[in-house]
Image (cartoon, rainbow, N blue to C red):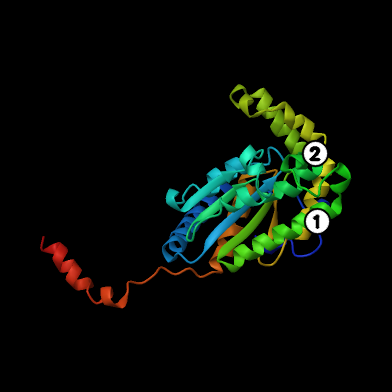
Amino acid sequence: MKLEKYKVNNTIKLKDFNTKEVEENAKKALNKVSKKLAKLQNTMYAEGKYSALICLQGMDTSGKDSLIREVFKEFNARGVEVHSFKVPTELELQHDFLWRHYIALPAKGKVAVFNRTHYENVLVTRVHPGYIFGENIPSVKSLDDLDDAFYHDRMDRINDFENHLVKNGTIVLKFFLNLSKDEQKNRLLRRLNIPEKNWKFSAGDLKERKLWDKYQFCYEDLLNRTSKENAPWFIIPADDKPTARLILAEILLEELKKYNFKEPSLPAKMQAQVEEFKAQLNNE
């Protein structure tokens, strides 16, 4: 695959991106890539110099949960953490909008996957601006204050946030799962038609679906304003789940390989004593 075509390098229109690509033997190929990713992550963990933040955004039913399960299944559990950000709690609303994301960031050597991310603060809150009042911001007195300039300023703050992370050793990679409206309909119907999937369905999904065009506008705007060379966005065709997982995994592998992680060597003094240590163990 030519992975560069998924990267947001210039001003884009979402309508120009495919929502469906089908790769033969995607599941088998993913197994191989996942093992390579796990090995790479082990080396990153041992080196302890970098961390990685993987951000996943997408419309409801775009496949974020199953993608996380399949792409990261080979990872050592101690090296990966998954955070799913839902409606802010009372405590979280008492802080700035980035606080709850900041405290979930990965330590050196670890990978954090944000399933929905800090971009919800310029996405859901832009579609439903009334949510902002829960943050009790002094300068926000009415809906008139929640104009494009307000959300663009937030995007600038997010760019600053991510730039700060990168400068301190966090690799930031962001993926938008680009789902078609027709495929979302099929997936919602599947949740209703299969009894064991019923629990996944929410009436709220249908209400949000009616706002599809507004969400697409907001996604396109944030992708154009927040895809930076040091924290890029990638648009992943999400209608075919196995292929979407493979594309994301291959991008992740290629991006992480650029950092040339190295397993640390023993200090010279200990290296000189290796044979002595072996002898002690063998002579027990």
Where residue 153 appears, as percent x and y from the top left, is 79, 57
Q: Position of residue 194 (x, y in %)?
A: 63, 24
Instruction: Name the residue: 72% across, 59% down.
Output: 157
Residue corresponding to mark 1: 152
Q: Residues within 10 Å of mark 2 (few under 14, many from 20)?
A: few
Q: Residue at x 61, y 60 (%)?
A: 172
Under circle 2, the secondary element is helix
Q: Nearer the viewer, residue 134 or 75?
A: 134
Q: Is residue 66 left or right of residue 75?
A: right
> What's the residue at 78%, 59% (across, down)?
225
Nearer to us in this view, 136 or 166: 136
The three-letter amino acid code for the residue at tag 2 is Gly
In the figure, 34 relative to 129: above or below? below
**Horizontal relation, residue 213 to residue 24: left or right:** right
Closer to the N terminus: mark 2 or mark 1? 2
Mark 2 lies on residue: 130
Identify residue type, mark 1. His
**Location of residue 138 with respect to 209 vertically, above or below:** below
Residue 276 appears in the figure? yes
